[in-house]
Image (spheres, rainbow, N blue to C red):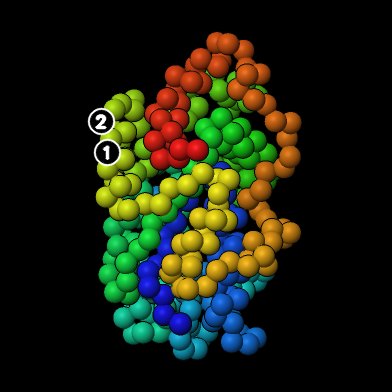
Amino acid sequence: MSCENIPVYLHIPKNAGTYIIHVLTKYYVRIFWTGNDLSIQRLTVQEHGYNLTIFVKFLTNYWQGDENMKMVSELAPRAKKCSINTLKTYINNKQLDVLAIVIEPAGEKLDLRPSFDVTDQVLNLTNKTGQYFTILRDCFSRQQSLFHYITGSESVHEPSHNAIAENTFIGYLGSRRLEDSWLIRSITGMPNELPITNFWYKQCCYFLENNNFIIENIYNIDTTLNDILLNSNGKELVDQDTDISVSNKNTTSSKPKMTIEDLPEQIKQHFLKHTYWDRKLLLNYYKK
């Protein structure tokens, strides 16, 4: 089976990225299954400020004894990590096929521009085009999920664990630490000290449109994934691919849900003003 293009997913934190990686893993194992083997792997390439998680199908067994392919955990037999040069060598030697790429943030600095350059290098080596896509989410819902995740025990494995100093969600919403737009800052690499303006908003939109991003709402994940994977591999998702009855590190425990109307008026207005550009992105790219 030869894919026509390679899905490239930009993972916005707390926008169902862990679920998407889970679904992609089950999907590729199912459609490429050839017996009791581990040829389908997730390779993590760690770079400054970002990680690439690259789904691959190994075409030889050389990787099993290669010291450059390092185990991530004994509990994750389908997860390895390697350098970008090792990955490029495997592609050039036709020792693997690239199936999909996930661009993930890592660290404090919000500048993912280098990750797109490296992704383009990988795509060029495969002689395939990338189908970029990302998932957007209601800003208030995402901020609520982000707060409870970063301040909760679920994020102990993350560098950002307890990075939010405020003890309450309302306190966070009224603080300067409240995110204005992760996506605009990450894509443009704009200086942290500058406020977002229409210039940076348009730079972000230009990048998304110039790279033919498919942009969908979090409530349409399965339909979006199915369309992208069907176009790439000619195979649809099935129920077992989207079964989430598995343990998952990046899930936030159920918390009492607050709505924006529950906020004190001063906090509500601060939130709306601070997140103006993020909400504008959602309205621009997702129209019900």
Amino acid found under the numbered disc labelled 1: Gln
Query: Label 1 belongs to which residue?
Result: 203
Q: In this orientation, which residue lies closer to the viewer: 194 or 219?
A: 219
Disc 2 element = helix
The CA span between labels 2 and 1 is 6 Å
Which residue appears at 27% of the width and 50% of the height? 210
Task: Locate residue 110, reporting x and y percent.
Answer: 39, 41
Q: Which mark is residue 105?
A: none
Task: Locate residue 173, reporting x and y percent.
Answer: 56, 23
Query: Label 2 belongs to which residue?
Result: 199
User: In this rendering, would 152 be left or right of 126?
Assistant: right
Task: Locate residue 62, reporting x and y percent.
Answer: 47, 88
Which residue appears at 48% of the width and 20% of the height? 272
Density class for disc 2 (Cα within 10 Å; few <14, some 14-19, many ≥20) is few
Could you say which quadrant of the image residue 27 lies in?
Answer: bottom right
Could you say which quadrant of the image residue 120 lies in?
Answer: bottom left
Disc 1 element = helix
Could you say which quadrant of the image residue 248 lies in?
Answer: bottom right
Task: Locate residue 33, reporting x and y percent.
Answer: 59, 82
Amino acid found under the numbered disc labelled 2: Phe
In this rendering, is residue 196 above or below 204? above
Which residue appears at 52% of the width and 32% of the height? 139
Q: Are marks 2 and 1 in contact (CB under 8 Å)?
A: yes
In this rendering, is residue 259 above or below 71? above
